[in-house]
Amino acid sequence: DVKVTQSSRYLVKRTGEKVFLECVQDMDHENMFWYRQDPGLGLRLIYFSYDVKMKEKGDIPEGYSVSREKKERFSLILESASTNQTSMYLCASSRINTVEKLFFGSGTQLSVL
Amino acid sequence: DAKTTQPPSMDCAEGRAANLPCNHSTISGNEYVYWYRQIHSQGPQYIIHGLKNNETNEMASLIITEDRKSSTLILPHATLRDTAVYYCIVMNTGGFKTIFGAGTRLFVKA
């Protein structure tokens, strides 16, 4: 089975900490995405990447950065975590320039105290 | 990217067909309609997609109106395991800037 794996299912961090969320896919996909999901707001795109070392801002990039050093791995970084970043974070991947579907990971529930 | 409008919740009796509507009146010619669902505590899962023709797979059927301004996802024989949030989205190739709204919460009742 194809897989998008997120490193942690649950994470608790303190305000001001630097937080790394890791995502790995085994499908050789070019595109990778980070979303956050909050009740009543659906999924909102934070950043996406269409190639190694390439990144583009999504709808809500403020307070986040990303890293894509290898094709299979896409990291989301919270430079200084804040309580309003408490959320479910979902990683996804897809092939480039096709109408291929998105494959999602199981999500990381991050709580910032 | 075009946005979609879905009812916030729907009920369906187990064994009956579940028909989930979606409006996408600003869809453009190169945008596909996709449906995903999210079962509690999991990431969204792809169900089906289409451009202008009706589509069917082992999970569901997708009916797109001729003007492409709306569509309906049909689960022909809903089971309790189909209880989930269903997202209708439109996107072009590459899936960049895909917009997921709040979706429809489907409750399948015994």
Image (tube, rainbow, N blue to C red):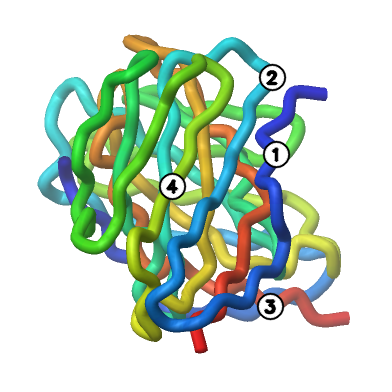
Residue at the extreme front of the image, as rendered: A17
Residue found at x 22% / y 54%: A61
**Amino acid identity at mark 3:** Phe
Q: CA distance from mark 4 to mark 3?
A: 34 Å
Q: Nearer the viewer, mark 4 or mark 3?
A: 4
Q: Which residue is mark 4?
A: A76
Residue count near mark 2 (Cα–Cα under 10 Å), binned few <14, some 14–19, many ≥20: some
Which chain is home to disc 3?
A: B
Residue at the extreme bottom of the image, as rendered: A113
Position above or below: A76 against A36: above
First reached walking from the N terminus: tag 1 or tag 2: 1
* Mark 1 and mark 2 residues within 8 Å of each other at the beta carbon: yes
Residue count near mark 4 (Cα–Cα under 10 Å), binned few <14, some 14–19, many ≥20: many
**Amino acid identity at mark 1:** Thr
First reached walking from the N terminus: tag 4 or tag 1: 1
The disc at residue A26 is 2
Q: Which residue is mark 3?
A: B107
Residue B55, position in %: x, y? Answer: 53, 27
Q: CA distance from mark 1 to mark 2?
A: 9 Å
* Residue B100: quarter of image: bottom left
Q: Nearer the viewer, mark 3 or mark 1?
A: 1
* Mark 4 and mark 2 residues within 8 Å of each other at the beta carbon: no
The answer to whether marks 4 and 3 sit on the same chain is no
Q: Nearer the viewer, mark 4 or mark 1?
A: 4
Q: Secondary structure at mark 2?
A: loop
